[in-house]
Each structure stands twice: as structure tokens, then as C-alpha cells.
Image (cartoon, grey):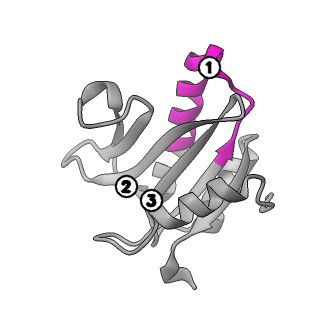
Amino acid sequence: MPEEIIDEELYQQAEELLEPGEIELNGLIVHTDLGRDKEAELNQTTIEIGDIVAEHAAPDEETFVYSGTDDPEFGLNQHQGLTLEDEEFVWECQQLLRDGTFRIVFYYEADTDQDAVLEAVSEAGYTVVGVEGPHSE
């Protein structure tokens, strides 16, 4: 499971977003080779990784993806995984364009097994780096 930080600036930005709030969070950064011309593949990748996160973060819940295109208060490349029954938070992500390719940054509750999520995303064939919130220190 790769843990090498590929983009230090993006890693630091992701760490800052995990600062204490209502929910303690961990996250991951997925490095893709997908550019603007691969939007359909980018969205499929986001859904696939979101499903992996949901399997670990909410294993007994059915989830759905709520996207920026559904809400004017969301960014176009921002998505959330919510539980189907009561629409509770499972994960959130942003698709960020860096040097012509997308990085997908996911956040989820810190009580999710971080190592298991990273291993599953890596085994699915993605280049991934974990980001842990300050609660993990």
C-alpha cells in the first residue's frame, strides 16, 4: 500500500481540512491520470472509491452519492456519500485538477479503519495516500 506523499502541497491542504470540527475526520488522496477530457471516467472512479469508503465507514447502511450538480451550495466537483435511510454523512470528496490531471480527496469519520480503506483502494488499482486528522497524533 503506497504511502509516499506525491504532492506535498495538496497533502498539507487536505490535512488542514481535517482540523477539529463537529466530526473527527481522516481522509485519502487518490492520484489519477484523468484529465478534463475524461469526465465520465472521473465520475465513475469517484463512485467506485466512494463505494469502497462506504463499505468501511457504514458497512450496514445503503448509501447514495449526492453531487454538486444537485445543489447550488455545492461545488460542481464536490460529492457526498450519504446513508439512504436518514441521509447521514458517510464521506465527502472533491475532484481537484492539478497539473492537468485530477486528484480526488475523500474525507470520512475517523473511526473508520484507515488502513483497511487504504488497502482496499490500493488493491482496486489506485495510487492513494492516507491523510489523518490531528486526533490521530
Image mark for residue 108: 3
Where residue 40 appears, x then y in whole percent? 56, 17
Nearest to N terminus: mark 2 or mark 1: 1
Residue that appears at 78% across and 53% down: 6
Nearest to N terminus: mark 1 or mark 3: 1
Neighbour tally class for label 3: few under 14, some 14-19, many 20 plus, Cα within 10 Å = many
Mark 1 vs mark 3, CA separation in Å = 26 Å
Mark 2 vs mark 1, CA separation in Å = 35 Å
The magenta segment is 30-50
Residue that appears at 45% across and 72% down: 111
Where, by quadrant of the figure, is residue 20 drawn?
bottom left
Secondary structure mostly seen in the magenta stretch = helix
Nearest to N terminus: mark 3 or mark 2: 2
**What residue did someone put label 1 on?**
36
Between 51 and 137, the residue placed more toward the observer is 137
The disc labelled 3 sits on which kind of residue? Tyr
